Image: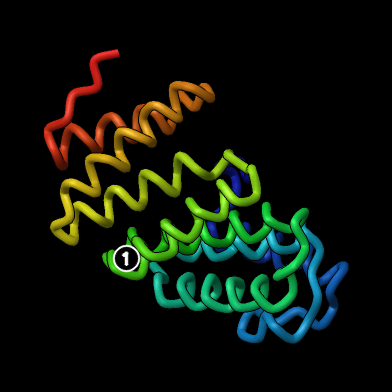
Amino acid sequence: SFDKRYTYDEQIDMLMSAIHLTVPDFNIEEINKCLYAFDEIKAIIQIANIYLNLNRNDQAIDIFYQLLKYVRNHYREVITSGKITLLVLYNYARALDLCGRYEDGMKLAKEGRDACIQYGHYQTLPGCLEIYAECCHFLGMDDESTEAYDQAYYLCKLIGRKEDLEITRNEAKKYLNIDFKH
C-alpha cells in the first residue's frame, strides 16, 4: 500500500509500470491475454480497489470480473493457488457490496467463505463473512445476516483481527441492533 503522498492516479501509474516490468504486454482491458505471478495479481487487485476509491465502480467491477475468470481458468486444480482465488473472491465481493450489487456480492462472499474453509486459509474468512452478512441484511435475510455476523465476530476475536472485529461489531449494531458485549 502507498502512503498519502501519491494521488490515486499516480498510484495506478506506478502499479501499471511495475506490472509492465514483468508483463510488457499487460492490458487492464484484456487481463486474460497474459500469465501472472501472485504479486502481479495483487497489483491488479490494488488497481481495481483504487478505481473503487475514485468511484470508477464499473471499471473496478470489470477488472474483478476479468480476474476471477482468469484465476478460475488458470488455478483450478492447484491447491497452493487457493490464496490467489480467495483474494480475488474477497475483493470482488467487497466491490459488489460497496456498489449495492448485494445479490452478486452475497454469492461471491459465500463462495469465498467456502473456499477459505476448503483451502484452510483464514485471513480473508472474517471479511467474507462480514460482506455476506451485510449483503444478506440488505436483501432482507436478517436471520442469515445475524448468523454470519456472529461467526465473523467470534472468528475475529479468535484470530485477533481487531480492525475487522470493530467493523463487524459496528455493522451488526447499526443494521440489526446486535450488541456483542465481550
- Tell whether 161 sits left or right of 133: right
Residue holding disc 1: 99
Q: Quadrant of residue 182?
A: top left
Where is the N terminus found, in terms of image quarters? Answer: top right
Look at the picture and state if 106 lies above or below 125.
below
Q: Type of residue at label 1?
A: Cys
- What residue lies at 27% left-to-right and 40% top-to-bottom? 147
- What residue lies at 14% left-to-right and 39% top-to-bottom? 176
Q: Quadrant of residue 68?
A: bottom right
**Where does residue 122 sit, x and y in percent of width and height?**
58, 39
Nearer to us in this view, 76 or 94: 76
Q: Is residue 46 visible?
A: no
Nearer to us in this view, 4 or 150: 150
Look at the picture and state if 37 lies above or below 160.
below
**Where does residue 116 sit, x and y in percent of width and height?**
57, 48
Instruction: Please identify the residue farthest to the top as the structure is shown.
Output: 182
Mark 1 nearby-residue class (10 Å; few <14, some 14–19, many ≥20): some
- What residue lies at 75% left-to-right and 57% top-to-bottom? 79
Q: How is the image coloured?
A: rainbow
Instruction: Please identify the residue farthest to the front as the structure is shown.
Output: 118
Q: In which quarter of the image is residue 63?
A: bottom right
Look at the picture and state if 28 lies above or below 150.
below
- What residue lies at 56% left-to-right and 55% top-to-bottom? 115
**Where does residue 101 sit, x and y in percent of width and height?**
30, 69
Nearer to us in this view, 8 or 65: 65
